[in-house]
């Protein structure tokens, strides 16, 4: 084994000048006016730098116990020379996060994986949603349903997600601005109100049947965040009346708001979009992580125009440490949304950049 390692190091040393001159890839740009096309855009976009498929949801056990879950697959195009013919060349990385929020545990149960694409072990395929990371899978079937399988030493998720509503295209036809400059943007759509069925379990416990609803975000970009951005706050909410709410703000390193946007689709299908000046996130309660020391505004009031939405977390500790895969620590948690004491829906709140500035 030591001989193999020494030989590899010697090879890299000999080829170092050639590697230094390798041409970096040219990443595709997000262009306004681009029309999203399905099922093609359900699949991967390997010419862009960063992409993710994000599923978050609330489910209940047969006894009525509420649980939150998250499954995320990331695809990241590296700066490796695309002309390198080697099958071992790390052109694309595939990363997976999975988490279960259970108040009986008091913290997130989660796991993470990462691998270079190739050899039938990991992929993010084009044409339709087809993601694999060892035995973690997310596949969109011909029926339009999604099949999600996560098996690890920490948790098990075997879920079927059934669309019940049309795709919700975010921004201007799928062009979602993330800053004042047009190049800071992503292509972005959501699938709210996915009907969930299946089984979930933690390590050492027998998986139990669950049912509920979920939200799927699919986003791809090459330069989403402006240099002065430190992170974002985002919510995706399935409203009880059949409507849907998405809102986000990009925060500056000084703590102010750099950009914001929101979309509300009411129960009749009418879509209202809100400009940066109409969207705000105001903390109403904070929680300090005993592990990282980060302080998160785990309860917030979100304003979209004249509407106010109060967010209350299922539990305070929903911090996810993914430094072994993406290098980030973030808070990703199940929240209840209400107004004047009346529940309006359930969703997920994501907060990044509270430990250190977020890098995509």
Image: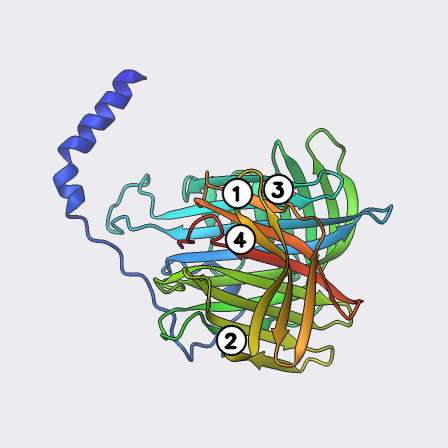
- Give the mark, 3 or 4, whose residue is nearer the N terminus: 4
**Residue at the extreme right:** 63
- The residue lying toward the viewer, choosing from 206 and 326, is 326
Kind of element beneath mark 2:
loop
Residue 176 falls left or right of residue 137: left
202 relative to 165, above or below: above
- The residue lying toward the viewer, choosing from 168 and 66, is 66
> Where's residue 7, x and y in %?
22, 23
The answer to the question of whether label 1 and label 4 lie on touching residues, with beta carbons closer than 8 A, is no
Of marks 2 and 4, the one in the foreground: 2
Residue 167 falls left or right of residue 213: left
309 relative to 105, above or below: below
Kind of element beneath mark 4:
strand
Distance, label 3 to label 1, CA atoms, is 30 Å
Q: Residue at x 77, y 68 (%)?
A: 240
Which residue is label 2 attached to? 171
Which residue is label 3 attached to? 150
Crowding around mark 4 (Cα neighbors within 10 Å: few <14, some 14 to 19, many 20+) is: some
Which residue is label 1 attached to? 293
Distance, label 2 to label 3, CA atoms, is 31 Å
Of marks 2 and 3, the one in the foreground: 2
Quadrant of residue 102 within the rendered picture? top right
The answer to the question of whether label 3 and label 4 lie on touching residues, with beta carbons closer than 8 A, is no
**Quadrant location of the N terminus?**
top left
């Amino acid at each position: 084994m030591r001989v193999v390692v020494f030989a590899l190091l010697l090879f890299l040393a000999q080829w170092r000048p050639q590697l230094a001159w390798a041409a970096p890839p040219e990443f595709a740009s997000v262009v306004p006016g681009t029309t999203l096309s399905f099922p093609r855009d359900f699949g991967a976009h390997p010419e862009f730098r960063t992409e993710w498929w994000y599923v978050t949801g609330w489910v209940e056990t047969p006894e009525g116990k509420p649980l939150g879950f998250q499954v995320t697959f990331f695809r990241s195009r590296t700066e490796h020379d695309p002309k390198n013919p080697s099958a071992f060349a790390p052109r694309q990385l595939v990363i997976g996060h999975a988490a279960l929020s259970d108040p009986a545990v008091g913290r997130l149960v989660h796991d993470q994986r990462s691998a270079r694409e190739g050899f039938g072990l990991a992929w993010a395929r084009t044409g339709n949603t087809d993601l694999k990371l060892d035995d973690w899978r997310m596949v969109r079937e011909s029926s339009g349903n999604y099949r999600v399988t996560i098996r690890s030493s920490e948790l098990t998720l075997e879920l079927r997600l059934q669309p019940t509503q049309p795709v919700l295209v975010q921004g201007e036809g799928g062009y979602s601005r993330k800053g004042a400059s047009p190049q800071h943007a992503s292509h972005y759509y959501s699938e709210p109100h996915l009907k969930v069925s299946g089984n979930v379990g933690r390590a050492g416990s027998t998986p139990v049947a669950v049912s509920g609803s979920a939200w799927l975000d699919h986003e791809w970009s090459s330069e989403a965040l402006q240099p002065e951005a430190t992170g974002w706050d985002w919510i995706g909410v399935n409203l009880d009346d059949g409507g849907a709410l998405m809102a986000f703000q990009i925060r500056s390193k000084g703590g102010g708001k750099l950009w914001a946007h929101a979309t509300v689709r009411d129960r009749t299908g009418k879509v209202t979009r809100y400009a940066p000046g109409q969207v705000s996130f105001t903390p109403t309660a904070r929680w300090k992580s005993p592990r990282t020391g980060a302080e998160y505004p785990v309860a917030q009031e979100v304003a979209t125009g004249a509407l106010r939405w109060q967010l209350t977390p299922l539990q305070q500790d929903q911090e996810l440490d993914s430094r072994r895969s993406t290098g980030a620590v973030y808070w990703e948690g199940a929240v209840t949304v209400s107004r004047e004491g009346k529940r309006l829906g359930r969703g997920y709140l994501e907060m990044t950049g509270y430990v250190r500035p977020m890098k995509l």
